[in-house]
Amino acid sequence: MYRYDEFDRGFVESRAAQFRDQVERRLCGELSEDEFKPLRLQNGLYLQLHAYMLRIAIPYGVLSSDQLRGLAGIARDFDRGFGHFTTRQNLQFNWIRLVDAPDILDRLAAFDMHAIQTSGNCIRNVTCDPLAGAAHDEIEDPRVWAEIIRQWSTLHPEFAFLPRKFKIAISAGAEDRAATGFHDIGVRLVRNRGGETGFRILVGGGQGRTPPAGAFHPEAPHPVLSRGGDAGLYRRRPPCRRCRWCWHRPCGMMPALPDGYGRMACRTGCRAMPMRLCR
């Protein structure tokens, strides 16, 4: 798993200090709820009916024993003694007081964790095969690629305020234990007949009441992800909630979708707004 250096620790600590100031301004009435909402969402804090909920980032589902003990301490000291692991391999505490939120972020920073990009319309936590690194059927450890995507997407200015949240998953086993087909982008590691490792890309998957499965891109080589900083992920708000996506032909970074997957029509008959995968 990735180990924080002094830059990482300094950044997370400064982010927690910034949020402490924002919470104090909210509590004393300097910020309205409408003004405070985008600030708290950038730090994983939701307002629920009876309390606040804090969602904590666990990159590709990997925790050290010290971090797990630290999370248990937060559950004991600030919640009701338990938390909830999510489908995106994060952890939620559902009974948080607003006044305690800055102390929790300070506690998280002390053992190299945070709540950045766990809420709001941004690229969310990159999920991975829960057996990554230990599965007998995996081509290689997918956590390496999950970490590359995480570093590229974290605080990326182009993707901090998307019209919808954006989800990415990666898997390297013969069995798709990461459910990559039900993400906006699913990445499957594959080998061609020459033994070269590359990616099988799925796009347009989703969850909800009528979850669509992602459509396949042709196999793509490693440089597609290693050059990820040159790519872009854009989603425009569709005209209706049930609308799926209309996919445009990418501009050289990735091959075009196969015939039949150029457009995903809305069931209500309206036309989907476009999405493209690169600048």
Image (cartoon, rainbow, N blue to C red):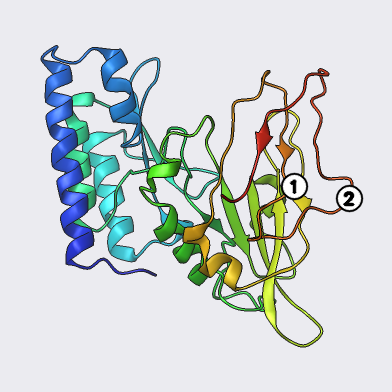
- How busy is the neighbourhood of tag 2: few (under 14 within 10 Å), some, or many (20 plus)? few
For the point 33% across and 64% down, which residue is it? 65
Q: Earlier in the sequence, mark 1 or mark 2?
A: 1
Give whichever of 122, 83 is nearer the camera.
122
- Quarter of the figure with residue 5: bottom left
Q: Determine the secondary structure under disc 2.
A: loop
Q: Is residue 227 above or below residue 59?
A: below
- Quarter of the figure with residue 49: top left
How far across and how far down the image is residue 59, in percent? 43, 56
For the point 29% across and 34% down, which residue is it? 79
Residue type, label 2 = Asp
The numbered disc on residue 247 is: none
Q: Is residue 222 left or right of residue 245?
A: left
- Quarter of the figure with residue 218: bottom right
Q: Residue furthest bottom?
A: 194
- Number of marks in picture: 2
Q: Is residue 189 left or right of residue 13?
A: right
Give whichever of 273, 93 is nearer the camera.
273
How far across and how far down the image is residue 144, in percent? 49, 71
Q: Is residue 95 visible?
A: no
Distance Cα–Cα, label 1 vs label 2:
14 Å
The numbered disc on residue 259 is: 2
Q: Say which of marks 1 and 2 sits in front.
A: 2
How far across and how far down the image is residue 198, in percent? 67, 74
Q: Is residue 84 above or below residue 186?
A: above
Residue carrying label 1: 214
Q: Residue furthest right?
A: 260
Residue type, label 1 = Gly
For the point 52% across and 69% down, which residue is it? 226
Q: Is residue 157 visible?
A: yes
Q: Is residue 17 left or right of residue 116?
A: left
How far across and how far down the image is residue 34, in percent? 31, 14
